[in-house]
Image (cartoon, coloured by chain):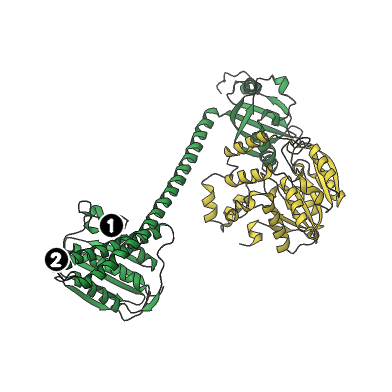
Chain colours: A green, B yellow
Amino acid sequence: MMKLPFGDSLEEFLDHSLSGHVFTSSRGEIINVNAKVVEWLGLSREQLIGKKITSLLAVGSRIFYETHLSPLLKLKGYFEEISAELLLADGSKMQVLINGYTRNDDTGNEVVVCLNIYRATDRRVYEDNLRNAITNAENIIKTERELAILREQFIAVLGHDLRNPLGAIKTGSALLARSLSSDRDKSILGTITKSTLRMEEMITNVMDFARVRLGGGILLNRNEVLVEPIIMHIVNELTISFPQRTVVCAINTEKAVSCDVNRLSQMLSNLLANALTHGAADKPVRIIANTTEDYLEIDVINGGRAIPQEIIGSLFEPFTREANTPSQQGLGLGLYIAAQIASAHGGLLEVSSDADETCFSFRMPLVG
Amino acid sequence: MSVLKRNNVHVKGTGTSPMMFAHGFGCDQNMWRLVVPAFEQSHQIILFDHVGAGLSDLTAYNPSKYEELDGYAMDILEIANTLQLKDVIFVGHSVSAIMGILAAAKSPELFRALVLVSPSPCYINDGDYIGGFSRIEIGELLTSLDTNHMGWSMTMAPLIMANADRAELSEELTNSFCRTDPTIAKQFARATFLTDSRSILPDCKTPALILQCSDDIIAPVSVGEFMHKEMPNSELVILEATGHCPHLSAPEETITAIQNFL
């Protein structure tokens, strides 16, 4: 075997080591140390022998040693990778990692504790930086969350407060409608009424959005109802606004459904209005509704160009609308809220779109 | 969640007189393994882990409940009541000794005697009172706990949650002692080392044995003497054993002292 350049004895080998070695009695009194420990601590070997191992540790490590490490040595016989701080003769501290284990000595019963100590000052700086980064990140997330809640509360309050003046405009227009006689005035009032309704819808959407985001979610007032009259009512209502368009219905829903009639109407109205607005003008919009054994399924289908790929993935996200179109479409909350209504019913709203047609499919369990 | 599962309670022994063992900060019920066999024939042994330590149910850890030692004392009473124990001999190590005093002050009728191993009602020096540490030093301890994971690496926690019922895994866990969730360990350290329970000592009328080691940096002899002076029905025994855990370092001496007292 090749002779290693450390001299002949184990002591010489240990004195060459870059790590510290300390041997103590089972009561924690130091029996021997290697040269590295002497160098680190700034105390001579003679000064160290007989001292308590805990007296070499900074106070935090000292308490940890007595409450956790000392029991581990008795119970398990070893501990590994423990981060600690040595207390040096000049009063400064040095970060180390310690492995410790117990061994019986020559007499077979008295236990010797062996500690292997590694300098970990760089490692500790690195770990401290990681810990600080985590703390910083957590603080930023906390601040951002608080800001987000504040913003959404602002939206909720704004939406609510806009309703009152809008209500006054609505009432005023209704009163004026009785006394206006000229066609020009009636036409102006018609525009005012239409805009008021559009604004009212936007406010409702904004408030629904805030309600969902603030954690309340969409609350349902469920009843066992037949769906066909609901669908027909929505169709009749919207074909008044789109007199030149055809809506073809294939409804086969004889089973009662447990749902919130107002919310379901809101969702269907949104889907049908979208289909009429965005679908090809020369093709009919189709509504296919069925109740199966366990589910209610409603498809709203329009012809025309496909929804662009870059939009389709985020279609049900809030504030989504086709980037280059004017604000004529509103806030881009309609489909988000429709999807929230579907999910409040335990159901799902999905979309498929190709060059021929676009289909929004709603599916919910019959029993809530 | 049952109390017994929450605190990983184990009941054994062939005797009828109940003897309840509570571990201190930094460890779990395993630390009683050298002492318990001496009492198994004569007593009913109750072992448990404080919530957050050992194999207790971590999901039951509620930071506001366990912010102070009262929360832990409530658990001790709940375990005793669930098992319908009477005339309990409570053996508590370190901070658990104080929890035992708190529990006995709340429900004195449940307890026959308290055995307080290396107890301290207050670790921080205050005027004439020598607890052993300054406030700054305790702060250093809390910081140093940040740098150790106490055997609980981050990847392990979800593993345990997901496989709670797998026998081989829980056996493996039983083999690793004194495991403590690091966040909880820090809060437990705060509850332990910042506590000042000196004022409740005179209210404890339950017979109490105070076992203090002759050289313990965590709870010096002067603290044992202070407790003995303040507690009207107490006995003080200074053990030859050194360190903070005589039940591990000198089990025979500890057993003899408890037997003499009982």
Is A244 situated left or right of A216 in this image?
A: left
Q: Nearer the viewer, residue A110 or A7?
A: A110
Q: To which chain does the residue with label 2 belong?
A: A
User: Residue furthest toward the left?
Assistant: A282
Check disc 2: other Cα within 10 Å, few if <14, some if 14-19, many if 20+: few
Amino acid type assigned to the residue bearing label 2 in the image:
Arg
Locate residue A214, reporting x and y percent: 42, 57
Is A250 situated left or right of B222 in this image?
A: left
Secondary structure of the residue carrying tag 2 is helix
Image quadrant in which the C terminus of chain A is located: bottom left
**Residue occupied by mark 2:** A184
Is A241 situated left or right of A224 in this image?
A: left
Q: Nearer the viewer, residue A342 or A214?
A: A214
Is residue B195 something one can see in this rendering?
yes
Residue A110 occupies quadrant: top right
Q: To which chain does the residue with label 1 belong?
A: A
Amino acid type assigned to the residue bearing label 1 in the image:
Gly
**Residue occupied by mark 1:** A332
Q: Which mark is residue B178?
A: none
Check disc 1: other Cα within 10 Å, few if <14, some if 14-19, many if 20+: many
Image quadrant in which the N terminus of chain A is located: top right
Is residue A361 something one can see in this rendering?
no
The number of numbered badges drawn on the structure is: 2
User: Residue furthest toward the right?
Assistant: B260
Distance from Cα at disc 2 to Cα at disc 1: 33 Å
User: Residue furthest toward the bottom?
Assistant: A254
Q: Residue at position x 59%, y 26% from top?
A: A19
Secondary structure of the residue carrying tag 1 is loop
